[in-house]
Amino acid sequence: MFMHLFLSIFVFLAKKLRHGSGANGVQYEETPTWAVALVSAVFVIISVLIEHGIHSLEKWFRKRQKKAMIEA
């Protein structure tokens, strides 16, 4: 649910920035700080979740003594 919300906001902001090159669009310099912070926070949260998943996978491999997979 939250991922859908963040994705919707990201798509909305991307469309605003893409159309920013015209006379009526919002330029990057005019993008609200909260919007840039929100997109950055989403990227940080996603990267932390991926890192946690990799760490959990490593623990699972160690528990099952999959040495070749741990080294990979």
Image: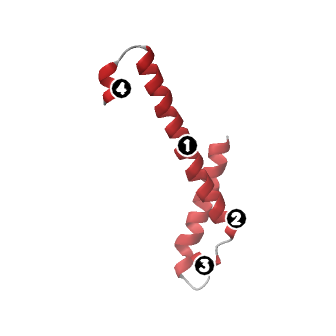
Q: Nearer the viewer, residue 37 or 7?
A: 37
Q: Nearer the viewer, residue 23 or 43?
A: 43
Work out whether mark 2 precedes mark 4 in sequence or the reverse, and give the earlier one: 2
Q: Residues within 10 Å of mark 1 (few under 14, many from 20)?
A: few
Q: Residues within 10 Å of mark 2 (few under 14, many from 20)?
A: few
Q: Which mark is residue 70?
A: 4
**What amino acid type is highlighted by mark number 4?**
Ile
- Give the alpha-carbon distance from disc 1 to disc 2, as whole Å: 21 Å
- Give the alpha-carbon distance from disc 3 to disc 2, as whole Å: 13 Å
Quarter of the image with the C terminus in it: top left
Which mark is nearer the camera, 1 or 2? 1
Work out whether mark 4 precedes mark 1 in sequence or the reverse, and give the earlier one: 1
Which mark is nearer the camera, 1 or 3? 1
Q: Give the color scheme: rainbow, by chain, secondary structure or one colour.
A: secondary structure
Work out whether mark 1 precedes mark 2 in sequence or the reverse, and give the earlier one: 2
Q: Secondary structure at mark 1?
A: helix
Q: Are marks 4 and 3 in contact (CB under 8 Å)?
A: no
Which mark is nearer the camera, 2 or 4? 4
**What amino acid type is highlighted by mark number 1?**
Val
Residue 42 x/y as whole percent? 60, 51
Q: Residues within 10 Å of mark 3 (few under 14, many from 20)?
A: few
Q: Secondary structure at mark 4?
A: helix
| 16 relative position to 32: left or right | left
Q: Are marks 1 and 3 in contact (CB under 8 Å)?
A: no
Q: Residue at x 55, y 39 (%)?
A: 49
Q: Nearer the viewer, residue 20 or 52?
A: 52
Work out whether mark 3 precedes mark 2 in sequence or the reverse, and give the earlier one: 3
Residue 21 x/y as whole percent? 52, 80
Q: In which quarter of the view is residue 70 placed? A: top left
Residue named by callout 2: 34
* In the image, residue 48 above or below residue 33: above
